[in-house]
Image: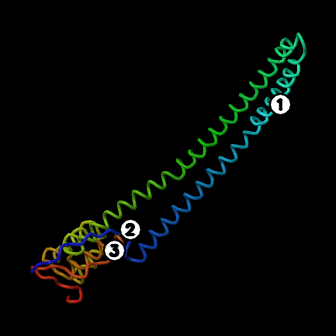
Amino acid sequence: MTFPAPRRHLLLYAERPARRMLQVLADLTVLVWTILVVNAAIALHDLVLTLQAPGRGLTDAGERVRGVFTGAADAAGGVPFVGDRLAGAFSPGSDAGASLIDAGQAQIAAVAAIATGLAWLVVVVAALPVLVTWLVLRLRWVLKARHAAAARDLDVDLLALRALVRGAPGRVRKAAGPAGDAAGAWRRGDPRVLLRLADLELGRMGLRGPTSVVTSGSAVARGEQ
């Protein structure tokens, strides 16, 4: 008898409602947290930018000083015979205004750099670890669920063995039925116990249990037990 090849499953969420709801809540929590952190970073950025006010005032003052001395130099330059000397006398004032402008612009740029750096620091410290942890856990679950869902089609024995090794002893004994000999039932290939153990292992990941198990070259459905 030929059985179909296992299908490749790519699940992003659990098949069982309870686990799927927890995953959705986790996604929403991470999303809300990220939005809050980004908004906080933006607010901090804007708050720090208010410290640019002194620099802007210094720049404005420098522009006024430079404008006054430049205008005076232009007017003095029109005086016959001594205009060039008079205009030159106002040059230090124009240079002082330019220095004030440069100092104000440097302060504005420094505050902007600090504001941007602090905003990114908040995002990196508060949001990035959460996002990385969430992504790693989600990818790990997706890969495990993919392999488990593929094994559910044709390798129920493996899932049952994993339940024996990793499952809670009480739940494993309960899956074995009244006898409670789960390991013995697995060795004998008891289809009812295999299905229950596989269901236990798949349920741990939020996946539906298998509907059939292959024993002695034939497929036995759950309803046929």
- Residue at coordinates 31% horizontally, 70% vertically from top-left? 168
Q: What residue did someone put label 1 on? A: 64
Residue 112: x percent and y percent? 65, 39
Query: Secondary structure beneath disc 2?
Result: loop
**Pointer 1 local density, CA inside 10 Å: few below 14, some 14–19, many at least 20:** some
User: What secondary structure is found at the residue carrying circle 1?
Assistant: helix
> What mark, if any, has residue 207 been given in the picture?
3
Q: Nearer the viewer, residue 154 or 203?
A: 154
Amino acid carrying label 1: it is Arg
Residue 213, image quadrant: bottom left
Amino acid beneath label 2: Leu
Q: Going by the picture, which residue comes out furthest to the bottom?
A: 224
- Judge from the rendering whether residue 127 lies leftward or rightward of residue 73; answer left or right: left
Percent of width and height locating residue 16: 38, 77
**Residue corresponding to mark 2:** 12
The span from disc 3 to disc 1 (Cα, nearest Å) is 73 Å
Image point (33%, 74%), residue name: 207
Kindly indicate whether the residue at mark 1 contacts the one at mark 3 (C-beta within 8 angstroms): no
* Residue 190: quarter of image: bottom left
Whole-angstrom CA distance, mark 1 to mark 2, is: 63 Å
**Is residue 50 placed above or below 207 in the rendered structure?**
above
